[in-house]
Image (spheres, coloured by chain):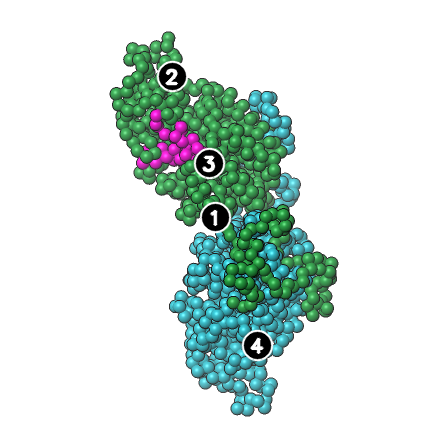
Amino acid sequence: MSGYQGKKNIPRITSDRLLIKGGKIVNDDQSFCADIYMEDGVIKQIGENLIVPGGVKTIDAGGRMLMPGGIDVHTRFQMPDRGMVSADDFYQGTKAALGGGTTMIIDHVVPEPGVSLISAFEQWREWADSKSCCDYSLHVDITEWHKGIQEDMEALVKDHGVNSFLVYLAYKDVFQLSDAQVYEVFSVIRDLGAIAQVHAENGDIVAEEQQRILEQGITGPEGHVLSRPEEVEAEAVNRSVTVANQTNCPLYVTKVMSKSAADVIAQARKKGTVVYGEPITASLGTDGSHYWSKNWAKAAAYVTSPPLSPDPTTPDYLNSLLSCGDLQVTGSAHCPFNTAQRAVGKDDFSLIPEGVNGTEERMSIIWDKCVVTGKMDENQFVGVTSTNAAKIFNLYPRKGRIAVGSDADLVLWDPDVTKIISAKTHHSTVEYNIFEGTEVRGGPLVVISQGKIVLEEGNLHATEGSGRFVARKPFPDYVYKRIKARSRLAELRGVPRGLYDGPVCEVSVTPKTMTPSSSAKTSPAKQPNQPVRNLHQSGFSLSGAQTDDNIPRRNTQRIVAPPGGRANITSLG
Amino acid sequence: DTGHSHPSTLNDRLLIKGGRIVNDDQSFHADIYLEDGLIKQIGDNLIVPGGVKTVEANGKMVIPGGIDIHTHFQMPYRGTTTVDDFAQGTKAALAGGTTMIVDHVIPDPGCSLMEAYDQWRQWADEKTCCDYSLHVDITHWNDSVKQEVDSLIKEKGVNSFQVYMAYKDYYQMSNSELYEVFSFLAERGGIAEVHAENGEIIAEEQARMLQMGITGPEGHVLSRPEELEAEAVFRAITIASQTNCPLYVTRVMSKSAADIISQARKKGNVVFGEPITASLGTDGTHYWSKNWAKAASFVTSPPLSPDPTTPDYLNTLLSSGDLSVTGSAHCTFSVAQKAIGKDDFTQIPEGLNGVEERMTLIWDKAVTTGKMDENMFVAVTSTNAAKILNLYPRKGRIAVGSDADLVIWDTDSIRTITAKTHNSAAEYNVFEGMELRGAPQVVVCQGKIVLEDGNMHIISGVGRFIPCSPFPDFAYKRIKARKQLAVLRAVPRGMYDGPVSEFSLSRGGTPSASARTSPTKQPVRNLHQSGFSLAGPPITPDDIPIRPAGRRIVVPPGGRSNITSLS
């Protein structure tokens, strides 16, 4: 066998068939020693003494861990921003991902308000298909709300393999939706069997604070974090949990950046809410003290929303919650801009394009902060970097597991390698790396994507455009089993009562006079034209008129004389 | 007893002998001498004028009269008025041992706050039987409202203003408006009160309930689950904390809302929670009553929680100090008025009774059960309210110089609450049939006996308006200290002198290579740029008279750094 290794005249065999011998397979539930044989990008056999065709390329794992390739659930490659585009496109971004052991990314489609979701989705597909080096999928962001959007969502779920939509509680007057709109979006998402994602920050307060901070003459990147205190993040998380509970919709909070936000999620889970929290590489690996750096360009490189918390104990806290299961899944929210792009906001922090790097560093940072420190074991590591993401977004077990029939996306992990993160050596194109100088232990030794070796001996062999779009089906079991059970229970019933037959007070909906009380005669009030409205009546106008007339009446409503005779319902009792 | 021949003496001078004075901090035995509506002397063997009427307390507790911090008497409602006017309402209050009420002025959106205030003053001055103050509700927000709030604080003796997070498209305010109201109140020394419920979600839920054919009072509570109350409380606290404004949450009705308040207090927020008689004494199971009129009589917002363990929980938090103060939110409608909503629960006028039952109910639920002692009882029924509204120690304390509003409290009296005997004009009492221990034996208001031997001697119109001044120490000492700490500073940096990307603030396609083939004709906007347009032009030195020192530094100490290099 070894005679065929590296032979250049039979490249097809070496690239499509691969045997990994002597590895310890690490899934999220168990670890065991076995060989793996893969062919045509799929894992074909797992076991010992496998019978494989001759001429297969073989890798000796030497007892090292072999785990499912990472899934970065949150990237924003090649993202348009006011005529600029984020520095890493789908080629550079996925290359960086592969360099760090991540073999699948899920990017966000951000439709311009006014543009149909479908055309934005197709635009992103085109960008990604031509450049992506690994498999990918797409979340679609809901940046406005009307009937047409609902139809687009249905089409995306049914025909285009999208099962997650993000709404914004921030970015006032641009992307931000009102509570009522969020309620309606969540109701639609639940009916479609998708996942509601939320960017959780109170945009109204952020806008007020930005104005206040600028008025105080604070224009640098520190103004970004000062105008977005972590309370504002926690408030929005709490509110979206409330709306999700109300609509019985599964919720996924992107970019958990602060202790308080993570606490709200943890508490909601203890109360039984179906909610998932996504800390990102940056919130797990660094903090917001850098916003005060005297180097403007460095400070600006950390600008993202919600911001990194200035509390330096935050990363450790979030790593602990990730380890105990209160937070479930990790992304990078990789969306870096180069310094010249950031400098658009050199005189006004609210104009600095937002986003940090992290897709390449994600797996190593989590290994270093959580596994090396004993917060989690190798199986949990696989859970939070890959498997949970695959389960939530209905990719499991095709992705997120080493099993026969699964995609051949694997990483041979070296727990002992140490590396100092630096912009000089990273695969991203930006000048700054927010983890600059951080020494991390643990990294990928070999990365296999679609059954092909893309990283070996420190060399990346990424092929532009080889990444496939992976369609995702609605109603992921991991999420919807509980939701379905709850919708069956949540049926509400009216109380069967006799008809009220007592006196009814006269109501003037638009009364001409102020009040009929005796003292009104002497009232000096000069506003007789203003109708006295009801404090206690909601101003909400019922859509669909009175329920009685056209809709078939419910049985309980038909009972005029209830069983046991008609009760005198106006009597005390 | 010569008192009967000297009615003026009898009315204006009073000696209470042999009582145990209970304030919020301590209890002690002493006699009290009252004259001209004030407490003149406290002690043993007092020297008092002859012919003074003497009340023998026989060792019973003498407590400061209760302050009901939340009432809606004589409230206009779509052309009718709540059944208890200021005379009827304050009579009920006095009967229960409450000697001061604080009513809510509710201006219609778009109407003048000042005119509404004058209207309420007139109604109350004509009829109240005890002293009163007023909260003013802010039902819309603009510059003229701001002016009126300013004058109400400065000239009219109002220091508390309520905003609504519910009643969508009517009273409800947006988060930005709340932020602005709170900022303004913090500046002027007011207390921000909040009706905390998420009105947007309620509107959605109401529509859903009605579509499902649920039209009875149970729909009221089903469309307003307690989570929506807790969510709004959480949000109000966030905004108050952001603006450094003291917050007062009216009508704490559920465990979850109370929990949020107590957590926030533990984190150091200046927030006060007001459970009401109804949430401390009964629960929301009655919304499912087959008797429509009875079910409707419980309709109030936020609703009573259907969880029957709620009252006990709230009493515990009240006893531990996590909730600070109690009101009744007394706002009663007749059955015929409630029946406006007989086919649609959203039309049922909201409000229930509680002004008369408040003190007795708290005594029974919290003191006889050992949750709180008599001093804490005085605090939550009277003293804390006086402190929050800046009326202390004129109200809320038995001390020389304080108003002569006192109650001799009988801890052993037991009576059964029923609409047949209560002083409200409403046909239903939400506490119907409850047997409660503890009641006022004698009530003294403005130095005059108004309740004795079960007989009431009240005079309509004697109640005075008590002005509340801004910056109450109880709330503002901490706020002021924090304001001094909260000064933000910019980082002194060199000017950024590197290249700057081209960007389009308004419109423009993407310059990326693939954009040429993009099927979308719409310009791509910025995900990360806030659409908020900065009010006012870019900052110039003239706009900001006091610029932070840090901003003046163009060349920082140590020379100008090359700020575009890696470091």
Query: What color was chain A assigned in the picture?
Result: green
Give the amino acid type for the residue marked by disc 1 in the picture.
Ala
Q: N-terminal of the two: label 1 or label 3?
A: 3
- Label 4 chain ID: B
Q: Position of residue A286 (x, y in %)?
A: 42, 37
Query: What color was chain B assigned in the picture?
Result: cyan
Does mark 3 fall on the same chain as mark 1? yes
- Residue A161, relative to residue B357: is it above or below? above
Identify the disc placed on residue A490: 1
Q: Is A494 covered by the magenta stretch? A: no
Does mark 1 fall on the same chain as mark 4? no
Does mark 4 fall on the same chain as mark 3? no
Q: Of circles 3 and 4, which is in front?
A: 3
Give the magenta part as a residue range: A377-404
Mark-to-mark CA distance, 4 and 2: 96 Å
Give the amino acid type for the residue marked by disc 3 in the picture.
Phe
Nearer to the camera, A292 or B437: B437
Q: Which residue is mark 4?
A: B446
Mark-to-mark CA distance, 4 and 1: 55 Å
- Residue A270, relative to residue A378: is it above or below? below
